[in-house]
Amino acid sequence: MSTAPIVTDLQKINPSAIIELFTLTTDATLHGSAQTYRFHNGSNLNNSSDIIWAGNSYLKLPIKAEGFAFQKGQLPRPTLTVSNALGTFTAILLNVNRVTTGNDLTGATVTRIRTLARYLDAGNFPPTTTSTTTTTTIADPADAESVTYTVTVVQDSGGNNVFAINGVQKPVITMKRGSTYIFNQAHSSNVGHPLRIKSDAGGQQTTTNAGTLGTDATVTYEPAYPSAPNDLRYYCTVHGNGMGNTITMNDPNTITQQSVTTTTQQVNPLGTPDPTAEFPREIYKIDRKASENREVVTFELAAVFDLAGIRAPKRQCTRTDFPSIGTFIV
């Protein structure tokens, strides 16, 4: 429990409403079992349902609680009148009186809890929906191409083996991000010359390789948009860069896509939930059941000190003990 947030909030010009909650706790010896009942009257939150605070649910129940103010020279003896329209308290009293005849909840603990609306759990408030629009630029599928190259291995003028692409010796190839390029190495001259694609800075690129060189082999490369690097080349993994050449990489036409993400969550619009922020708790015992009918049950409460016959403070100066108290000597 912490009163510091309460003190700070009450010093503001418009503090949030004070929320009054009650717990009724039975005693295992007196009443057969230790049960805690939680309720509130909803008068300060315009709330027609339960209130949730510190993870506990407090039942909406018409309550009239009065007499909590301290009077000069004596502890308060409040009364608590609760609705019995649904027979809730009659049922509780019947169960208790089966254990101790005529007990009527005498000795049960009533705790008065007060906090501020700004510290209530988020579950008390209607959910709010937030929509977030995300804009993404992608390669236009209509601009994508699918190109198949026929690959053979030939000797250049210097007698060196090189790749011929569609009959042209080691040409510079132009590609477009977001497209598909298939290198067909089915020709028998490709045996022992696997073609791959790499970045000079980033290493070998991911390709899909199928079949057997010189029979039905294909190498498929799909440069991603926008991440495919610019410094690409095709080469032979056995004989090196000299068999191939560079690849010029271009960007495709693009389109913009929008996606909407909807998030629903509950928040406390008055502040931040805090299960520890509360006024000092007031703890009483039920002294007796004052009245009961089909509509209401009224209990008289007493402070624990009062029931124990304890004076607070214990050392009191009264005229009985000190006759001169209150006498002025001129």
Image: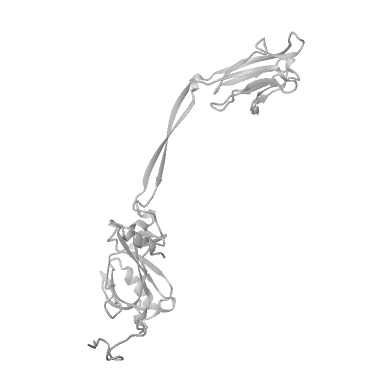
Q: Is residue 191 above or below residue 124?
A: above
Residue 267 on image: x %, y %: 38, 50
Quarter of the image holding residue 198? top right
Q: Single out the residue that lies furthest toward the right.
A: 159
Question: Is residue 102 among what the camera can see?
Answer: no
| Quadrant holding the N terminus | bottom left
Q: Single out the residue that lies furthest toward the left.
A: 330
| Quadrant holding the C terminus | bottom left
Q: Nearer the viewer, residue 199 or 46?
A: 199
Residue 208 on image: x %, y %: 64, 26
Question: Is residue 19 among what the camera can see?
Answer: yes
Q: Nearer the viewer, residue 227 or 41?
A: 227
Position of 135 compared to 208: left or right?
Answer: left
Q: Single out the residue that lies furthest toward the top.
A: 157
Q: By what rule are the colours in the image chosen?
A: one colour
Q: Is residue 141 above or below residue 326?
A: above
Q: Is residue 261 above or below residue 21?
A: above
Quarter of the image holding residue 302? bottom left
Q: Residue at x 75, y 18 (%)?
A: 191
Position of 308 compared to 230: left or right?
Answer: left
